[in-house]
Image (cartoon, grey):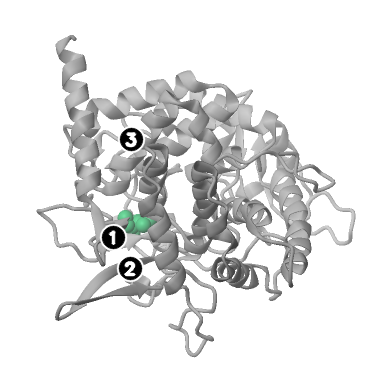
Amino acid sequence: MTRAIEKKNLSIAEAWKLLEESIIYYHGKPIGTVAAHDPELDALNYDQCFLRDFVSSALVFLMDGKPEIVRNFLVETLKLQSHEKQMDCFQPGSGLMPASFKVEYNGSEEFLVADFGEHAIARVPPIDSCLWWIILLRAYEKATGDLALARQPEFQEGIKLILDLCLVHRFAMYPTMLVPDGAFMIDRRMGVYEHPLEIQVLFYAALIASRELLLPDGDGDDYLKMLTGRLGALKYHVRNYYWLDLKRLSEIYRYKGDEFGKEVANKFNIYSESIPHWLTEWLPEDGGYLAGNLGPGRMDFRFFALGNLMAVIASLASESESQSLMNLFANRWQDLIGHMPVKICFPTLTGLEWQMTTGCDPKNSPWSYHNGGNWPVLLWLFTAATQKTGRVELAEQAVAIAEERLYQDHFPEYYDGNYGRLIGKEARLYQTWSIAGLLAAKQLLANPDHLKLISFAEIADNLGCTL
Ligand code: GLC
């Protein structure tokens, strides 16, 4: 064995050890992983298990044939699910899953304390938690073949409560889900309110997963009908109206404004002046992506990695769109991968735009953190998307780049700079989902069959699922 390979193997072993050390135990059973274990920094809430963060760890455990922790997590978080009616503005609505939880002690007695956003900075609601929870339940079923867990009445009830919350009629006009700012991985003010792509894609995947998991008995059939209708509309809406490539951009560029009526081209009243200058030059001939957001008179042209990659994995993006997205990564490698995969959003917000959009948030300063930082956790999503599109060589390159630095940098939470060259200004080290992101990506590459845990086949246009 050459020295380099020996060194790499040692480091992988270290990553596995760090993941083991991040496990949280409850009544002697493993139930989750802490967000980070940085000995130098104040833990704040990073000593908690975040639901969204745990998905990366869970996939590693499932792929490694250790489903017990995932099962325990699903069981315990289901017990935490909110059943409260909305009492005041900080009370979680019924069906919501917490952002995070931790084990607390009363003498020798252990109990779980959950945070639904009522303690989180800026009191942001973790809307993605309940969507990831359903997606993970399906992944657990795929990995273990254990159909009994999701069929338990409490699990069926839990899924329905989530669907009640997501499918309720409010004032929205679109099939997409209307949410406040910071409702997902980007959990600070970043102009990602309204109909952010990431939530729509997770919503879509969670609806397909629910279709697979829900039993038709009792009122199950009503839920199945309801969600099937929404799925079709959501797919049509995102594919047709969020997609951006040169052809589409040219159409938007020549849109007329203030069109009234049913059959109009510019349904959302997007003005061509709102197309940012960088975009016209940045879009390659054969590349494209789904826009970050779409609302009345507003298209957010920023590129958001998680929503786009998950759209490929969940087959919300069509096959040709998925190929175009991979072309975009290949053509804009420095911008989107750079020195650490993967850029969370591109480009960054600067100056007045940064002031107005983030509320002058110093943590989200230009090319840092959510505002254009590079996040190693996104590596597994990138890897899965390349596998789905037959472009694995891109993931192999990205994993090699990540491995160059992640071990020696002690798995930072994120990196800063246009190309992700600096360890994030306020990044924690030993961030669990950075460790799990790399391990999951490597497991996927080693055994592409694992992709089935997280991948979704395209639903047919007549809405029968072509699984
Ligand atoms: C930050 C991230 C959020 C993550 C949490 C724990 O708040 O923005 O996405 O879940 O840290 O890692």
Mark 3 lies on residue: 439
Quadrant observed for ligand 1 in the rendered image: bottom left
Q: Position of residue 353 (x, y in %)?
A: 44, 56
User: What amino acid does circle 2 point to?
Assistant: Phe
User: For numbered disc 3, what is the local secondary structure?
Assistant: helix
Query: Which of pointers 1 and 2 indicates the residue nearer the eye?
Result: 1
Q: Is residue 372 among the parts visible in the rendering?
A: no
Q: CA distance from mark 3 to mark 1?
A: 23 Å
Q: CA distance from mark 1 to mark 2?
A: 15 Å
Q: Earlier in the sequence, mark 1 or mark 2?
A: 1
Q: Nearer the viewer, residue 109 or 337?
A: 109
Crowd rating for badge 1 (residues with CA inside 10 Å; few <14, some 14–19, many 20+) = few
Mark 2 lies on residue: 101
In terms of image quadrants, where is residue 168? Answer: bottom right
Position above or below: 156 against 335: below
Crowd rating for badge 3 (residues with CA inside 10 Å; few <14, some 14–19, many 20+) = many
Name the residue: 36% across, 72% down: 122
Mark 1 lies on residue: 29
